[in-house]
Image (tube, rainbow, N blue to C red):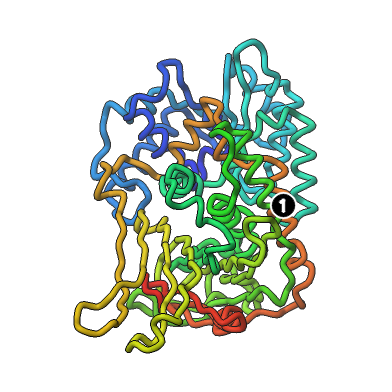
C-alpha cells in the first residue's frame, strides 16, 4: 500500500525497485500494489502513467534507473498487480476503504511529505489496519526526515508507537540501500587484518564526506525550512558514522546490529557551535556551466540563511574512539560528487628517516568509496627506486565492478525486500533516531540567528571549513580523490 502513489518517490525509486525485484524473481505470485493518492485516477491510469515514467527513465542516462530497455515480463508482473484508490490521508473513510482491500500481510509505505507521517499511522491504527493476527504481519515504512529536531523526533516516535509495536515500524534511510554502505560491516569484521588497528591507538582521524555537484533547483520549498544539517546529518551521515565506528555485534541479527549502532550514536558528544560551519552557495560555475546562487533558486527567500553546506567535528566518548576526531561534511554545488569514508592512520615515527632526502612521512589513508565509485583504496609510503632512500606515495585498491557483476539497483531494492521479509537490520530504531538528533540539537538551538558563511558554486566549500581542521593541524582530503 503506497500512500503518495502519484509522487516523485514512487515514480523515481519505488517502482523501479519493485520492477528489479520482480526481474530477480523475489516477489510472490500473490503480491499486489495499491496506490493511494488524493487525485482522480483508475487502475488503468496508474498503470499507464507508471509505464510511461519507467520508459522515460530507461532513456535517461542521468536517472537512478540503469536500464536501456524495459523487460516486458518483469514490468508485466508489476503492471498487472497495480491498483488505485483515491483518498484523503486526513479522512477516516480513506482508511475504511483501504481496509476493504487488505487481506493477509501488508506493508504500508508513507511516500508522502513528513507532515503526513503521524496522520497516516493514526489513520491505520484507528482503522485496525495495524493489528497482526496469526502468521500475518502489518508493517509501516516511514521516510525521512523523521522529525526536525530532538523534541519533534521524540514526539513522532511516541505518536506512532501508540498505534503499534516498534517491530512494525521501518524508518528508512536510502543510504543504507547502497551496496557499499552495507559492505562496510563485512569489510571491517570479516578481515582479521583490520579489526586490531581499527581504534584510537592507530587511527589519527576519520573524514566522512557526502558532496554533491547538483544544487537545490526545484526543491527549494522543501529545503528552505530544512537545510543541510537536518536533511543529511542525523540520518545519512550518522548512519555512515555508525557503520564505520560501531563495535562488532555478536551476530547480524537485526537487534544486535541496531543495538551497537544506538550505543555508538549515544556516545557522540553534543556538538558545540564552534565545532560546526554552515555554508550557502553563491553563483558560480559547476561542471562547465554557470549556475545561480541558492538565494536565486525557485521557492527560496532572497535573504535566506538556510545552509546548503555543513561541516562538523565530532567526538566519540568510548574506549575505542576517545581522542579521535571525526570530521563530517556534506554540501551541494561542490567541485566534485563524492561520498566516502576516509580513515587516516597515525604517521610512522620519522626518526630513522631524518638523515635521508625524505622530507616527511605522510599517513596511510584508507578510503571506503561509496559514490560514484564503489570500492576501497589505500595510499601508503614506499621506497622510490634508486640509490638513495627516498619515500614516495602509491595507491592500491579495488572497485566492486571489477570483481562482481552489476545488478540492477536504484538503492531501494534491498530495503524493500528486507521490509517484506521482516529483516530490520538496515532500518533505524527509535533510540537510534533520537540519539542522532540529540547530538545535533545543541547546534540547532545555539547558532546565532542569521549566521551563515558563503562559498562559490563549484568550489570545495567555505574557507571556514578549512579553518575547522587547520586549527587541529589537519586538512580536508581533496574531492578529486587526491590526498591534498
* Residue furthest out toward the left: 386
Q: Is residue 28 left or right of residue 390?
A: right
Q: Is residue 228 left or right of residue 23?
A: right
Image quadrant occupied by the C terminus:
bottom left
Near mark 1 (Cα within 10 A), the count class, few <14, some 14-19 or many ≥20, is many
Can you identify the residue that label 1 sits on? 266
110 and 35: which is toward the camera: 110
* Residue furthest out toward the top: 134
Whole-percent x, y for residue 57 in the image: 33, 47
Whole-percent x, y for residue 58 in the image: 29, 46
Q: Can residue 38 be seen in this view?
A: no
Instruction: Classify mark 1: helix, strand or loop.
Output: helix
Residue at horizontal 57 percent and vertical 68 percent from the top: 327
Q: In this view, does 182 lie to the left or right of 150?
A: left
Q: In which quarter of the image is residue 379?
A: bottom left
388 and 127: which is toward the camera: 388
Q: Quadrant of residue 53?
A: top left
Figure label count: 1
Q: In this view, does 81 lie above or below 225?
A: above
341 and 227: which is toward the camera: 341
209 and 149: which is toward the camera: 209
Residue at horizontal 35 percent and vertical 46 percent from the top: 65
Whole-percent x, y for residue 134 in the image: 64, 10
Whole-percent x, y for residue 203 in the image: 53, 64
Q: In which quarter of the image is residue 4?
A: top right
Q: Can residue 364 be seen in this view?
A: yes
Residue at horizontal 56 percent and vertical 46 percent from the top: 173
Q: In this view, does 369 lie above or below 451?
A: above
Q: In this view, does 208 lie to the left or right of 96?
A: left
Residue at horizontal 38 percent and vertical 87 percent from the top: 359
Amino acid at each position: 500500500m503506497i500512500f503518495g502513489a502519484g509522487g516523485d518517490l514512487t515514480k523515481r525509486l519505488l517502482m523501479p525497485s519493485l520492477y528489479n525485484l520482480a526481474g530477480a524473481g523475489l516477489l510472490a505470485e500473490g503480491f499486489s500494489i495499491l496506490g493511494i493518492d488524493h487525485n482522480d485516477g483508475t487502475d488503468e491510469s496508474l498503470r499507464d502513467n507508471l509505464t510511461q515514467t519507467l520508459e522515460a527513465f530507461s532513456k535517461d542516462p542521468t536517472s537512478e534507473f540503469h536500464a536501456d530497455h524495459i523487460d516486458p515480463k518483469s514490468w508485466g508482473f508489476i503492471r498487472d498487480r497495480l491498483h488505485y484508490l483515491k483518498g484523503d490521508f486526513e479522512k477516516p473513510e480513506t482508511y475504511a476503504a483501504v481496509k476493504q482491500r487488505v487481506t493477509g500481510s501488508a506493508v504500508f509505505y508513507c511516500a508522502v511529505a513528513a507532515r503526513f507521517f503521524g496522520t497516516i499511522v493514526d489513520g491505520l491504527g484507528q482503522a485496525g489496519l495495524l493489528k497482526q493476527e496469526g502468521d500475518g504481519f502489518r508493517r509501516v515504512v516511514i521516510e525521512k526526515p523523521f522529525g526536525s529536531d530532538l523534541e519533534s523526533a521524540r514526539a513522532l516516535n511516541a505518536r506512532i508507537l501508540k498505534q503499534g509495536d516498534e517491530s512494525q515500524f521501518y524508518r528508512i534511510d536510502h543510504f543504507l540501500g547502497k551496496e557499499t554502505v552495507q559492505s562496510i560491516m563485512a569489510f571491517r569484521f570479516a578481515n582479521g587484518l583490520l579489526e586490531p588497528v581499527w581504534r584510537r591507538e592507530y587511527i589519527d582521524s576519520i573524514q566522512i564526506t557526502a558532496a554533491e555537484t547538483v544544487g537545490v533547483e526545484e526543491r527549494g520549498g522543501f529545503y528552505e525550512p530544512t537545510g543541510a544539517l537536518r536533511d543529511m546529518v542525523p540520518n545519512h551521515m550518522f548512519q555512515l558514522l555508525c557503520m564505520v565506528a560501531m563495535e562488532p555485534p555478536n551476530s547480524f541479527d537485526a537487534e544486535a546490529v541496531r543495538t551497537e549502532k544506538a550505543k555508538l550514536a549515544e556516545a557522540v558528544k553534543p556538538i558545540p557551535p564552534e565545532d560546526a560551519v554552515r555554508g550557502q552557495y553563491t553563483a558560480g560555475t559547476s561542471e562547465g556551466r554557470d549556475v545561480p546562487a541558492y538565494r536565486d533558486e525557485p521557492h527560496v527567500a532572497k535573504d535566506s540563511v538556510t545552509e546548503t553546506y555543513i561541516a562538523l567535528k565530532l567526538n566519540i566518548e568510548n574506549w575505542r574512539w576517545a581522542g579521535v576526531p571525526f570530521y563530517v561534511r556534506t554540501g551541494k554545488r561542490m567541485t566534485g560528487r563524492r561520498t566516502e569514508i576516509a580513515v587516516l592512520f597515525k604517521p610512522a615515527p620519522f626518526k630513522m628517516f631524518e638523515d635521508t632526502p625524505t622530507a616527511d612521512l605522510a599517513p596511510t589513508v584508507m578510503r571506503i568509496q561509496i559514490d560514484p565509485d564503489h570500492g576501497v583504496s589505500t595510499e601508503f609510503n614506499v621506497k622510490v627506486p634508486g640509490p638513495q632512500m627516498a619515500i614516495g606515495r602509491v595507491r592500491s585498491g579495488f572497485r566492486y565492478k571489477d570483481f562482481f557483476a552489476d545488478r540492477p539497483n536504484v538503492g531501494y531494492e534491498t530495503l524493500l525486500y528486507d521490509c517484506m521479509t521482516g529483516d530490520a537490520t538496515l532500518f533505524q530504531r527509535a533510540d537510534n533516531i533520537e540519539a542522532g538528533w540529540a547530538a545535533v540539537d545543541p547546534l540547532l538551538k545555539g547558532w546565532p540567528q542569521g549566521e551563515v558563511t558563503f562559498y562559490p558554486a563549484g568550489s570545495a566549500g567555505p574557507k571556514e571549513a578549512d579553518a575547522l581542521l587547520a586549527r587541529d593541524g589537519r586538512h580536508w582530503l581533496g574531492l578529486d580523490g587526491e590526498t591534498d
